[in-house]
Image (cartoon, rainbow, N blue to C red):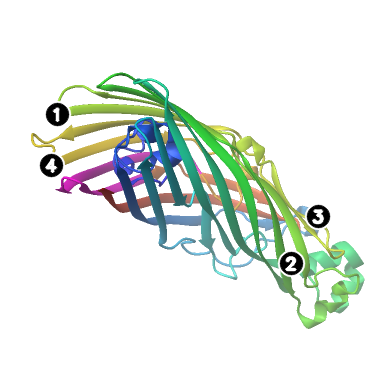
Amino acid sequence: MEQSVKELGQAFSGAPTNIEDGSMVFFNPAAMSQVRGKLLSVSGYVIAPSVTFQNSSSHLSPLLGGAPLKGNNGGDSTGLIFIPNVYYVQELTKRVAFGFGFNTPFGTQNSYHSDWKGRYQAINSEIGVLNFNPSISLKVTEQLSLGAGFNVQYLQSRLTNAIDLGTACLQALGPISCASRGLLPQAADGHASLKGDSVGFGYNFGAFYAPTQDTRLGVSYRSRVAHDVHSNANFSVPGNALVLTQGNSFVDTHSRTSVTLPDSVLFGFSHRVNPRWAISADALWTHWSLVRELRTDFSSAQRDDVLDLKWRDTWRYAFGVNYFSETNKWVLRTGFAYDQTPVPNAQHRSPRIPDSSRYWLTAGVTYALLKNIHIHAAYAHLFMDDAPVNKKGATADFLVGQYSEQTNIGGLQLDWRF
């Protein structure tokens, strides 16, 4: 959602009806028709999440003796994350406007200690999507505008985890052969790293309707984008486990992972109650059920790596209030949002994305530095439900415990009309 610092201040509740900054390119391109002249919006966000795992009973499969998983709880798995946006909108005629945006619509990042209990499922996870979005808008009538855009996405990913080669040996060669080599569960860890990228294409469109000067309605759609991620897979194997590479497994190779980033529909309403007060509300539906699993296919004999997610579709609801100073030089705003998680249960909560439902509480301010230059600042705190996890890994390890999470977001933005 972090595409507008102005909108961050009211929990993005006015995003599909926003005509004050360039984020309309992303949230609803139809609204670009309301811009006179040229508008440049540049913004940046610092996201400071805190995600900690508390172990309860992480263990190996009962078929392997059910021993507790060795290691620590992984530490705080996140650090500071910086996200930039740039948007430009230009009036071409009184009815046609053009715009483009450069932003990051999807991403995740976390990192655990290399010897933590969940190391066989995740150590480092970095996924980022850069999106370039040219758009056009047409004012059909004085009240109704339509808009559409084209999206080019570049996805980069880096995923690492440990491999319990002791367990892998038992599964492949049996206990006698493995015990003689010292290949026992949790006694011979290897390491896997996948680094890849992809380019995908999509589109977005929307409608903007202003029945009166004080009331605005908006709806927009962003399409799904299919990515075919080609990666280099690198494996580190201890000397006593090299026997497992003889069948062309656990060797450096190429890999491929297909993923479809979801489409979404955004509905919004805003109303200027009087010269001092305005309210806004929106609802966002996201088609997360497209993400059922992440399957990595290796060019070697290595069996597919499958992350079973079974995500579900989600809704996000937001409400905001704006207060305008008498001279309109200052605007104060606040907002609240409820944001559902796509994760269905503890069995499908991966330590790579230990997501839970969020409650946004936000505040922001706009200051008119000059008549044509506005500065926005905003802050959000995300209260997040505790997230239980009971996830089975590829080598019959079970990560069992609970995540405690919260997030702070701060942002600054400059709007320049010329």
What residue range appears in magenta? 356-382
Does label 2 or label 3 sit earlier along the sequence? 3
Look at the numbered disc 2 and give the secondary structure of its residue.
strand
Viewer-nearest residue: 358 or 260 = 260
Q: Which circle, 3 or 4, is nearer the viewer?
A: 4
- Magenta highlight on residue 343: no
Neighbor class of circle 3 (other Cα within 10 Å; few <14, some 14-19, many 20+) is: few
The residues tagged by marks 2 and 1 sit, at their Cα atoms, a distance apart of 63 Å
The residues tagged by marks 1 and 4 sit, at their Cα atoms, a distance apart of 12 Å
Does label 3 or label 4 sit earlier along the sequence? 3
Does label 4 or label 2 sit earlier along the sequence? 2
- Magenta highlight on residue 370: yes
Does label 1 or label 3 sit earlier along the sequence? 3
**x, y percentage for residue 362?**
30, 42
Viewer-nearest residue: 230 or 177 = 230
Q: Determine whether 409 is above or below 195 in the image.
A: above
State the residue position of label 1.
Answer: 276
Neighbor class of circle 2 (other Cα within 10 Å; few <14, some 14-19, many 20+) is: many
Look at the numbered disc 1 and give the secondary structure of its residue.
loop
**Is residue 349 among the parts visible in the rendering?**
yes
**Is 39 on the left-hand or right-hand side of 1?**
left
Look at the numbered disc 4 and give the secondary structure of its residue.
loop
Residue type at mark 2 is Asp
Q: Which circle, 1 or 4, is nearer the viewer?
A: 4
**x, y percentage for residue 302?**
83, 63
State the residue position of label 3.
Answer: 63
Tags 2 and 3 in contact by the CB under 8 Å rule? Answer: no
Q: Which circle, 2 or 1, is nearer the viewer?
A: 1
Residue drawn 65% across the image and 49% down it: 391
Does label 2 or label 1 sit earlier along the sequence? 2
State the residue position of label 2.
Answer: 164
